[in-house]
Amino acid sequence: MISSITEISTYKYAVAIKCPTLCKHPLFQAERPVWETINCNVLPKDYKETQVEDEESEIK
């Protein structure tokens, strides 16, 4: 059931629909955030930082 129609700007409308069955439909469920795990490790004592060459400089 359409509960309201509001013209936000010319040819742009907001339509509010009341339908309890939509709340149960999977496409209308709130998305849950994806959790990512970041594992950190101590660098070895003999680690030396190296520079990565720019891909463009390799092409020239």
Image: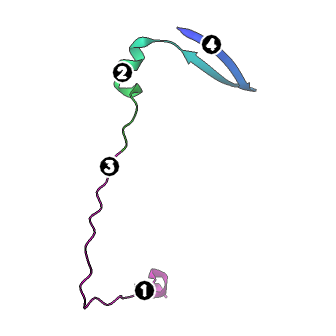
Within 10 Å of the Cα at label 4, are there few (<14), some (14-19), or many (20+) other Cα atoms? few
Secondary structure under tag 3 reads loop
Q: Upstream in the sequence, badge 1 or badge 2?
A: 2
Closest to the observer, 29 or 52: 29
Q: Is residue 41 above or below residue 13?
A: below
Closest to the observer, 16 or 53: 16
For the image, the number of numbered tags is 4
Q: Are marks 1 and 2 in contact (CB under 8 Å)?
A: no
Give the x, y percent position of residue 30: 40, 31
Secondary structure under tag 1 reads loop
What residue would you read off at disc 2?
25
What residue would you read off at disc 3?
35
Q: Upstream in the sequence, badge 2 or badge 3?
A: 2
Residue extent of the magenta highlight: 34-60
- What residue sits 37% from the left and 43% below the top? 33
Q: Are marks 3 and 1 in contact (CB under 8 Å)?
A: no
**Front disc: 3 or 1:** 3
- What residue sits 39% from the left and 13% below the top? 21
- What residue sits 23% from the left and 85% below the top? 44
Q: Is residue 56 left or right of residue 23?
A: right
What residue would you read off at disc 1?
53
What residue would you read off at disc 4?
4
Structural distance between the alpha carbons of marks 1 and 2: 51 Å
What's the image's color scheme?
Answer: rainbow
Q: Upstream in the sequence, badge 3 or badge 4?
A: 4
Give the x, y percent position of residue 59: 46, 85
